[in-house]
Image (spheres, rainbow, N blue to C red):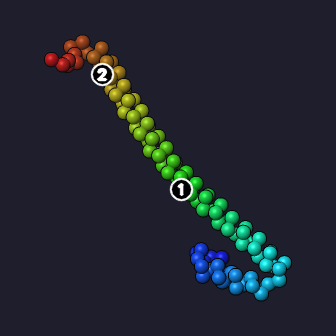
Amino acid sequence: MLKLPQSEERDEQIEALAEPLSPLKRSALERVWTDVTRLRRERDGELKKSSDNLKNLSAHDQAEALRKGNEKQQFSEQTFTAELAKFSAAMPDFRTLTAC
């Protein structure tokens, strides 16, 4: 019964189960049912948090990949410019083209 989704039918089954019990046992069953309900709410909250955490991690990973890609591109451009400057210095007849 605990695995059934929340419904009138499930509640009726639980009430039918509790009806023949003594007041002490009925009280214990109510406490257990309250605990089960609380644990379900906590579990649902944790599942929601884990979903949010996964979204945040994905966004962070995308931002990190973009940052690293930009760093690599910048490094490549700086390396190319530095090597071109060395080549230009070694070859006096070589000159870079400038915009007209």
Q: SS of the residue at dot 2?
A: helix
Looking at the picture, how far across and down is residue 45, in whole percent? 61, 58
Label 2 amino acid? Leu
| Crowd band around label 2 with a 10 angstrom C-alpha radius: few (<14), some (14–19), many (20+) | some
Label 1 amino acid? Ser
Q: Based on the displayed image, in which of its 4 quarters is residue 46 positioned?
A: bottom right
| Crowd band around label 1 with a 10 angstrom C-alpha radius: few (<14), some (14–19), many (20+) | few
Looking at the picture, how far across and down is residue 22, in whole percent? 83, 83
Question: Which residue in the structure is indicated by mark 2?
Answer: 84
Total residue callouts:
2
Q: Earlier in the sequence, mark 2 or mark 1?
A: 1
Give how far apart the Cα atoms at labels 2 and 1 are. 49 Å
- Residue 92 lies left or right of residue 38; in this view the side is left
- Residue 88 lies left or right of residue 61; in this view the side is left
Q: Based on the displayed image, in which of its 4 quarters is residue 79 positioned?
A: top left
In this orientation, which residue lies closer to the viewer: 32 or 68? Answer: 32
| Residue ID at (73%, 67%) | 35
- Residue 41 lies left or right of residue 92; in this view the side is right
Question: If the image is split into quadrants, where does the N terminus sit?
Answer: bottom right
Q: Which mark is residue 6?
A: none
Question: Which residue in the structure is indicated by mark 1?
Answer: 51
32 to 67, vertically: above or below: below
Question: If the image is split into quadrants, where does the C terminus sit?
Answer: top left
- Residue 22 lies left or right of residue 15; in this view the side is right
Looking at the picture, how far across and down is residue 72, in whole percent? 40, 34
Q: Based on the displayed image, in which of its 4 quarters is residue 50 positioned?
A: bottom right
Looking at the picture, how far across and down is residue 47, in whole percent? 58, 59
Q: SS of the residue at dot 1?
A: helix
| Residue ID at (53%, 52%) | 52
